[in-house]
Structures are given as structure tokens and as C-alpha cells.
Amino acid sequence: MLIVSQYVSLLDWHKIQDRLRTIFPEGTSNRNNHINPTASKTVFVMLYVSAIEGHDTWIRPDQVTRMTDAQAALQSDAERTAWKKFSVGKIPKDQPIIGRWYEQNSREGIRDDCIRSAFAVSGAVIVRHGLATTSSVGKYMLEKMFAGLFDPALTDAAFTQNVEKWQKAHLSQSAVLRQTLVRQASRKSGKGATVTFPSGELRHLAPGPSSAIAKAVIEAFAPQFLETPAVLWLSESANKEDRRDRDLADAISLNIQSDKHLPDIILVDLGPEDPLIVFVEVVATDGPIHEERKKALLKLVIEGGYDAEQAAFVTAYKDRETAAFRKTFGTLAWQSFAWCMSEPDKIIGLHERHGTMRLSDLLTLVGQNNE
């Protein structure tokens, strides 16, 4: 029986530092904190304990301080598993760690300068949010593609090629903006958010992963993709129905039943001659607009006396890289749209071919050309 190791092969921290200098070239924001010895040792410890996306292991900064050169040389699965357990345990005062890389009081610098201000900003490290400030649980792991750049088996050509792919995805101006918006959403999800409607009305959303996405739909999506936007309906898991929204929905003949087909957000574009009603489902974990959901919402529109062409359907996500997007995208209804708050000026259309429609027709439809 083939036994596969739970751990990746390792470079020593000096070689990791050499690769970091290539991954983060001159001009990278806060470059020194990406490439100094502390950065390379932090990456080494994450690789050592397999704190890599998909492995369900997270580290604390003080684990980096506990590593030693002698321990780093011990690389069997058993030795690494034993140290991983030791590195999060309580150390008796009369048993100091001989040769430790850093003193215990250095952990704040590792956390603030190396991880939060450098690796987390560039997307090299994933931060687990929602933990109490005083929590002793690990909250940092390497992004999977970034961790792969330290595979000792990579040839020079393969390393160069992989670095270019990672840089394009993480260090370009668009990538930095995207990561900033995602981090912002993660920080705000635990605090709730105050959303400003197109009318100027302010409404506070309860804490939760959906609140930041809902806020972005109203404040970013609506003004960019609708000519004259207005909010008809906004629901939350903590507050299923607001009386003001119920009155407005009744006034325009949308018979929404909270227990049956409650939408997260209903927007309306008053710009076209025939107003466009836009149903938006916010997906933090599950619940996209699939075919059955689309039919139920479309029925609301038709029963309210509107034409089917006056309805649009959007599923809103935090980012294309989230588990929620990967899990649900394949179930989205045709003739609907997907939008991510991390890329607010872009929208994904799921087109169903009608008649003699060709790809060239779609390119014309979205305002593109082949020049």
C-alpha cells in the first residue's frame, strides 16, 4: 500500500529567502518584510507543519519563535508531527528552548511586520477571521499556489514560470485591489455594516459574512450596473423582513412570501422606459439563484403584472476564489449573472443560445471587438 506523506518537502530557510527575492521583485510594496530572514523563517515553519491552504492547519506567530536549526533538520513525518504538537503547547519556565530562532516577545513583530503588513497584503498568507483577539488558536496559513513555489523539485524554468503566474494573480494593480476588498469584507463581517441606499437612507446590517456583500451590492453594484437604481427589498438572516420593504413590495404588487421565496435583495432600475426588477441573492456559503429559484422569482414578476423581460437575476459573492463560488457556480441558472464584490466593475453572464446566436454576437452584445 502506498503511503502518502501529509507533509511537503522542504528547502532550508536560506534557499527560501533566495526564492522570496525573486517572487517579490524591486518595487513590491513593503518588499523588505517579504524577503528578510524573518519572512523566510516564517514561510519555513508554515511549510514544516503543513500550514497550507487545503490542509486545515493554521499557525500562531509564536510557533516561528520556537523553531531551532536542530529541529529544522529533523524532517520525518513523525518528527514534524511531534514538533507541531510541542510548538503550540505550554513550555515550562525551567526548560528553555536552546537555540530558538527568536525570543518569545518577538512574536508581535512576526505577526505585525511579516504576516499582516506583508504576506497577508500580497495574498501569500491566508488569515482566518472571526476569532477573538485573545484566542490562542492558530490563524495563518500559506496560500496554496504560493506554497508551491518552494517545492525543491521545481526546475529553474518551472519556478520562473510559476512565479510569473503567481505575480500576475497577486501583485498586479487589479489583484492588489481585489485582495484589499476581500480583506476589508472579512474584517467588517464580524462587526456588521451600515449601508447607504441610493435614496440616501441608512440601514444597519447585522454582523455576518453576508453583510459586507449585501452592502457592496447596494453601494457598488447598483450604481455601476443600473442607470437609476433604487432598493425595493433587503432581508437578512437576523432580520428576515423589514416593514418598510414589505410596504414597498406590496405597493408594486410583488407578493413576496418570507417562508417560501424570500429574496435577499430586490433592486429596480428606473432608468429604462419599462423598469427593470433585479433579484439579487447574496452567497456567503450557499443559496445561489439556480433554475428552480429563478422560476419562483420570475413567477412573482409575472403575477405582479410585469413582463418576464423586466426581470434580471444576480448571484453575488465575495470573490471568485472563495469556496462558496466554487461550490455553487455550476448550479447558477442560465440567463442570470454572477457578480463579486472584489471585482466590482466586472460581471459574469450565463448566456443561453437562442436562434442563430454566435460568439461574435455575444462579443457585440458586451461591447467587445476583435481589433
Image (tube, rainbow, N blue to C red):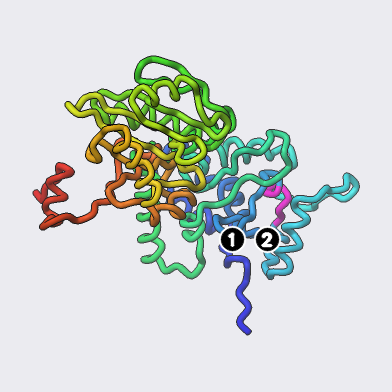
Helix, strand or loop under label 2:
helix
Magenta segment range?
A: 63-68
The mark tally for this picture is 2
Above or below, 359 against 267 in this view is below
Residue at the far top in the pictured view: 200
Counting from the top left corner in percent of width and height, residue 85 is at 76, 57
Q: Main secondary structure of the magenta part?
A: helix
The numbered disc on residue 12 is 1
Could you tell me which residue is drawn at 66 percent across and 49 percent down? 59
338 part of magenta stretch: no
Answer whether residue 339 is visible to the viewer in this image: no
The numbered disc on residue 72 is 2
Name the one closer to the observer, 325 or 68.
325
Answer whether residue 83 is visible to the viewer in this image: yes
Q: Amino acid at mark 2?
A: Ala
Q: Quadrant of the N terminus?
A: bottom right
| Residue contact between numbered discs 1 and 2, judged by CB atoms under 8 Å | yes
Residue at the far bottom in the pictured view: 1
Counting from the top left corner in percent of width and height, residue 311 is at 28, 37
* Mark 1 vs mark 2, CA separation in Å: 8 Å
Above or below, 8 against 202 in this view is below
Counting from the top left corner in percent of width and height, residue 18 is at 49, 55
Could you tell me which residue is drawn at 73 percent across and 42 percent down? 136
The numbered disc on residue 149 is none
Could you tell me which residue is drawn at 35 percent across and 20 percent down? 198
Helix, strand or loop under label 1:
loop
